[in-house]
Structure formats: C-alpha cells, structure tokens
Image: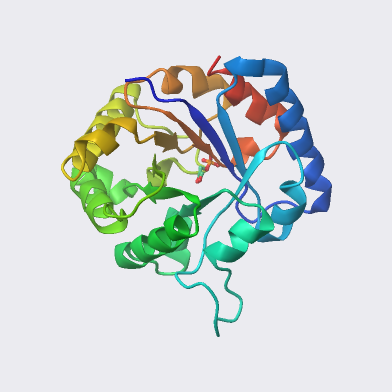
C-alpha cells in the first residue's frame, strides 16, 4: 500500500502579512520538484487564510467551531474556512486541548463539522511526558483515537501523532517508538474500518527539522509530518519537503 506523503505546516499564532512571502517561496520550491513533490499544506492563522489561498500552496486552518453559523463570538466555522479558501483543517491539537480544555467529544464534533464542509481533517493525538513515563502512551492515544475520530463520517481524515513532550522541545521519540505508535494507531483505526485505515495518512509531529526529517519520514506507517517551528521559514520547510524526494 503506497500512501502519498503529506508535509503540513502549522504556523500556530505566528505570521503577519509580511510572512505571505514565505508561503510564496514554499510554493516555488515545491513547483521546482515537479511530480516528485509530496503533498504540501500550510496552515497559517485565520487572518492570513484568504490571502494565502490566492497562491499556489494548499492552505488549511488550525481549528474550527462545531457549528455552521450563529451566536458564537470570536469563533470561525468550517464553512467559513472553506469559503475563505482553506481545503483542510487541524482539529484537536494538544495546544487547543490544553489551552481551551477541548476534550475528545468536542474534537470529534469539530471533525464532523469539518468533514461535512468538505475539508480534509487532520485530527491530532499524542501523550504527555507523564503518560509516556507511566507507560500509558498507547492507552492514551487509543482512547483519543476512539473518542476523537468520527469513523462514520465521509471524507478525508488524516491522523497526526504529536507527543506533547516533543512539541517545540527539540526532543523526539526514538525511531522505533515512532514506528510502533504509528502502527498501533493504524491498528486502532482498522478496528473500525480496515480498508479506510490502509489509506489513511498518519503524520508524525514534534520537533521535525530538516536534519531529522529523512529518517522519520522513512519509518513504517509514517505518511508525512506536521511541522510547527520549522514550517515558518521557507528554507527550513523546503528542507523537510525535500527529505521526501
Ligand atoms: P514543533 O515542530 O515546533 O515541535 O511543533 C509541532 C506541532 O505542534 C505541529 O502541530
């Protein structure tokens, strides 16, 4: 089973209009790779989506509300994201789970709304350091998969495995640990739908850099990367994209 690699950038709360030049440069670098290029996605803050979507790079968002419209001050719906030019959305990032108290049920409702709007939906899971040290990483991730993934919904679901302790720290799990967790995630998905599990892209996220991307992207069941800090500069992000070639 060959799954196309997906390299996705999550800009988090970074990026003013001047940063659109980085997305343009990413597009130029990807174009230079021609047919060898992996799928590439940049998820800038909401404020840059419609401008960024006028360029050549596929654009996504970092969160959405569960509804379509209504009295929810400050929130953005998946339908609005689609209308602004986004084709994808990240839901359930650990920073949203931690900063906004998002639980699996809410993440699942967000994923359902995003899929209903026709957005490719990247659902994030991952254990904390305490959970890893307690030996419960697999149980935690399996519970997040079971609770956060809307198995019955149509559309394209991508899973991002992001151990919380690896995000922004420069730390990564061992290659064996990454491969083992990705295999476990695919097995968990297969419990609901084996055919879908076989084609679902599972991304690794957490301190992916140009220097470690090639070995991580070569691991079994790793179908791409969700990149934070190293996606903000075109040169770094292109270094990771080039590691797929
Ligand atoms: P870093 O690549 O900065 O560790 O962030 C990973 C992440 O959270 C992507 O969603």
Where is residue 10, by image quadrant? Answer: top right
Q: Quadrant of the C terminus?
A: top right
Q: Relative to 182, is 144 above or below? A: below
221 or 227: nearer the viewer: 221
x and y, in percent, of residue 59 in the image: 63, 45
Q: Is residue 186 left or right of residue 235?
A: left
Indicate whether 73 appears above or below 29: below
Q: Position of residue 76 (x, y in %)?
A: 58, 69
Residue lying at the far left of the rendered structure: 191
- In this image, 214 relative to 185: left or right? right
Residue 172 against residue 141 in the figure, above or below: above
In the picture, the quarter occupied by the N terminus is: top left
Question: Which scheme is used to colour this image of the protein?
Answer: rainbow
In this rendered view, identify the residue nearer to me: 116 or 221. Answer: 116
Question: Which residue does the image show at 21% across and 47% down from the upper left?
Answer: 142
Q: Position of residue 72 (x, y in %)?
A: 55, 81
Residue found at x 44% / y 22%: 217
Tally the numbered discs: 0
The residue at the point 38 percent across, 61 percent down is 112
Residue 227 on image: x %, y %: 54, 38
Vertical placement of 153 versus 171: above or below?
A: below
Q: Residue at x 78, y 54 (%)?
A: 16
- Extreme residue in the bottom direction: 71
């Amino acid at each position: 089973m060959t799954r196309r690699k997906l390299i996705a950038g999550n800009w988090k709360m970074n990026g003013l209009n001047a940063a659109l030049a980085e997305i343009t440069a990413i597009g130029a670098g990807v174009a230079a790779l021609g047919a060898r290029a992996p799928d590439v996605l940049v998820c800038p803050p909401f404020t840059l989506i419609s401008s960024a979507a006028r360029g050549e790079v596929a654009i996504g968002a970092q969160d959405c509300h569960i509804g379509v419209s209504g009295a929810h001050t400050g929130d953005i719906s998946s339908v609005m994201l689609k209308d602004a030019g986004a084709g994808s959305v990240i839901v359930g990032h650990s920073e949203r789970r931690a900063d906004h108290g998002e639980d699996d049920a809410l993440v699942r409702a967000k994923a359902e709304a995003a899929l209903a709007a026709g957005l490719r939906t990247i659902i994030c899971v991952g254990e904390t350091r305490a959970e890893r040290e307690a030996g419960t990483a697999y149980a935690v991730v399996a519970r997040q998969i079971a609770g956060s993934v809307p198995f019955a919904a149509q559309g394209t679901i991508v899973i991002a495995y992001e151990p919380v302790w690896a995000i922004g720290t420069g730390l990564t799990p061992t290659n064996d640990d990454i491969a083992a967790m990705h295999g476990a995630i695919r097995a968990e998905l297969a419990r609901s739908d084996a055919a879908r599990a076989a084609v679902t892209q599972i991304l690794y996220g957490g301190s992916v850099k140009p220097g470690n991307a090639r070995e991580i992207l070569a691991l079994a069941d790793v179908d791409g990367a969700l990149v934070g800090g190293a996606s903000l500069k075109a040169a770094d992000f292109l270094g990771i994209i080039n590691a797929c070639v």
